Amino acid sequence: MSAHHATPARLSPAEHGIRPDGIDADSIEVVGRLQSAGFHAFLVGGCVRDLLLGFEPKDFDVATNATPDEVKSVFRRARLVGRRFRIAHVRFGRNIIEVSTFRKTESEGVELDSTGMILSDNEYGSLEEDAWRRDFTINALYYDPIGGELLDYVGALTDLREQRIAFIGTTSVRLAEDPVRALRALRFQAKLRFQLCSTILEALPDAALRLQAVPSARLFEEFNKLFLLGYAHAAWTAISATPLHRILFPCTPPNSEIVSEAMQNTDARIAAEKPATPGFLIAVLLWQDYAARVQELSATHPAAVAGELAAEQCIAHQSTIIAIPRRFSLFAREVWSLQPRLTERQPRFIERVHTHKRFRAAYDLLELRARIDPTLQDVFDWWTHYQAEPASRPELVSSLPVESHPRKPRWRRRKSRSNLPAQTSES
Ligand code: ATP
Ligand code: MG
């Protein structure tokens, strides 16, 4: 890795080839107005990297030597957010441009008082210091969309050319500062189809252990970035090949075929601009663990109780490392509890199942299950038919095999069982 460059490589438009038409106009306005007010301001990070690679940037971030308060004085509509490092959000209708002030590395910039509070005197830094505190070389490029110049302090352009993900500075130190960077490395490997440099590969076992100390809510944010931005399958494949898998997804077998299928489906949905929810991914990731637990608990509990206990247990287990917000764990539980209703197809409950708000997600899970268990194919086809042809529904229902040994519907709690018609095989 190269030493600090006192002067950056400076590339002109003819040399770097970035075309202004791919750049968000609001972000250019933010840079322009900061510069007119006498500050330095650049586009920075992922958007510059993506512009150079020909990807469409997800968002356009601005870095400046103006303090957050100074940014606010330039843009009256700016809102200051963040506690430790305040960032200005400049709003243009629905578009928000994030403006952050140049800062030093965490270790240099942060001074604590006796109560642990940050004394913020020297948290801000120079442009060069801002470049060196970033994670990967390819994420530390600065581009001035007004003057047209591209600045590279850290050898980013070489790594972009060689399609390599490398830390700025010493890998082990950067991973100790923030183990989430290991996950970010795998994310960029998946998104950009780049190679991890060998020091990162070597550091992954240690980084995996360190991830256990990261707040689970932050890991849920990373979970979303990994699997809901259009490269879920590549990200899943990358993680599955590393020791991070066992730590992050202790309930999911690494070669799970249905997870792999679900990740591909998620990517297809996002490419088609259809919504995708983490709730469904959680239902799939934990499905095999859930099903195994249901089986085991059924030996000693009524089916409905076994289902609830199994759901609680596997969600609790997964949540020790990645926090699952309640609305998403609830989503997964609803999708799971619909599975026996879908496969059993009791005639009197068909329409209620079909109109359930999680029917579609449950049907999607059934499709994935049928891929690995061909005995489910008929039932899946039946539901496909049922949805597609309302006119033939009565016929489809009457064609269902007569229940030879009627069962307690699994989704009913014991208390409400008295509402059900009497069942012949039960006491
Ligand atoms: P994407 O296009 O997927 O958003 P990105 O590079 O913009 O990728 P962000 O998570 O949006 O990634 O972060 C913006 C920038 O902030 C990064 O490019 C990097 O320079 C810096 N950064 C983000 N997270 C870290 C971190 N954990 N450590 C150091 N620098 C970071
Ligand atoms: Mg970004």
Image: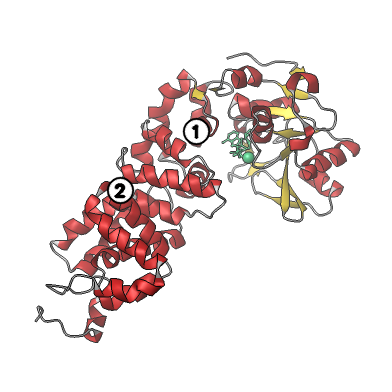
Quarter of the rendering occupied by the C terminus: bottom left
Q: Is residue 209 visible to us here?
A: no
The correct choice, above or below, for 170 with respect to 316 in the image is above
Q: Along the horizontal axis of the image, is 217 left or right of 298?
A: right
Give how far across and how far down residue 306 sits, in percent: 22, 64
Please tell me which of labels 1 and 2 falls first in the chain: 1
Q: Quadrant of residue 248?
A: top left
The amino acid beneath tag 2 is: Arg
Task: Categorize mark 2 by other alpha carbons within 10 Å: few (<14), some (14-19), many (20+).
Answer: some
Quarter of the rendering occupied by the N terminus: top right
Question: Is the residue under label 2 in contact with that under label 1 (CB below 8 Å)?
Answer: no
* Residue occupied by mark 1: 190
Q: In the structure shown, which secondary structural element does the residue marked by tag 1 occupy?
A: helix
Give how far across and how far down residue 193 sits, in percent: 52, 28
Which residue is located at x 76 percent, y 30 percent?
19
Between 314 and 395, the one lying in front of the other is 395
Camera-near label (1 vs 2) is: 2
Which residue is located at x 36 percent, y 67 percent?
386
* Residue occupied by mark 2: 371
Between 109 and 58, the one lying in front of the other is 58
